[in-house]
Amino acid sequence: MTPVPNCTATGLAMTLKPLYQVFGIQSAIMTSMQACSGAGTSPGVAALDIVDNIVPYIPKEEEKVETETRKILGRSSGGGGAGFLSRVATCTRVPVLEAHTEAVYVSLKKAATVDDVKKALREYGKDFLALKLPSCPAALIDVSEDPFRPQPRLDRDREDGMLTSVGRVRADQALPNGIKYLLVSHNTKMGAAKGAILVAEYLVHRATSRRACRSCRRKVHCNQVIDELLELSEMLR
């Protein structure tokens, strides 16, 4: 089974993809404020380090975010495609239990209004949503008009942790065709176990669709994969 990407890359890629498809992207910059749960339990984050504090560096996290987001957007190296994601991330740890918050700045290839950007984000993934997979949220991205949203405590559990919440979408004057926004993504649900289940459900759907194809030379293998994924999905629920 293909593993899910880095939990910080999940929210970033989810919101960059529609902008990449509709407008193209010249460059992007992201600063993350990551929950303590993202560090795991061993070694985790020492209480005395995180209480009333921000840890400004997470070893190897920035490289993971950049590499994995490029892969998701269809390019594993710089110099074209998603090469705009080279050395763009600053990742920090904050005293929040769950959900990562990210401040994203994007220079679009084509000029777009704030309303154009909001529309692209809200409409993203309609074909995927139409599959009605069991773990899929009603929408992949929600864009709030409330200037005080999104917030981890208020938005992380929407759609049972599978929704990427976006807010404060604004024009940015420092970048050509600049747009900036904040997002909240649940790092231990969409960014981890539940995201993995959704990937498994999609792979089952694809494999099942191919079952009826008489020309498939790997029919037996496809059936075995389907059975294994179904068993794994049930175990993870």
Image (spheres, rainbow, N blue to C red):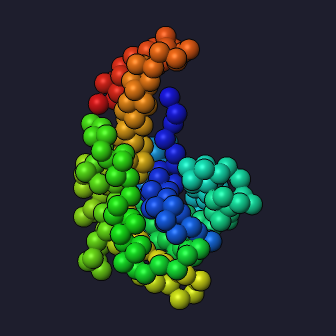
Query: Which residue is depicted at the point 27% across and 62% down?
Result: 155
Query: Which residue is depicted at the point 55% across and 76% down?
Result: 110
Question: In the image, residue 152 lies at what x, y percent?
Answer: 32, 63
Quadrant position of residue 34? bottom left
Above or below, comparing residue 203 to residue 149 in the picture: above
Q: Is residue 223 left or right of residue 147?
A: right
Q: Residue furthest top?
A: 220
Query: Which residue is depicted at the point 52% across and 33% down?
Result: 2
Can residue 211 be seen here? The reply is: yes
Q: Is residue 158 left or right of residue 105?
A: left
Above or below, comparing residue 177 to residue 84 in the picture: below
Q: Residue furthest right?
A: 79
- Number of marks in the image? 0
Q: Is residue 188 left or right of residue 12?
A: left
Can residue 49 be seen here? The reply is: no
Q: Residue furthest front?
A: 215
Quadrant position of residue 212? top left
**Pick the front one: 154 or 71:** 71
Question: In the image, residue 40 lies at what x, y percent?
Answer: 46, 45
Query: Which residue is depicted at the point 35% across and 61% down?
Result: 123
**Pick the front one: 224 or 116:** 116
Above or below, comparing residue 210 to residue 188 in the picture: above
Q: Considering the image in quadrants, where does the C terminus appear?
A: top left
Q: Is residue 70 left or right of residue 153?
A: right
Q: Residue furthest bottom?
A: 173
Question: In the image, residue 99 lies at what x, y percent?
Answer: 37, 57
Question: In the image, residue 76 lies at what x, y percent?
Answer: 67, 49
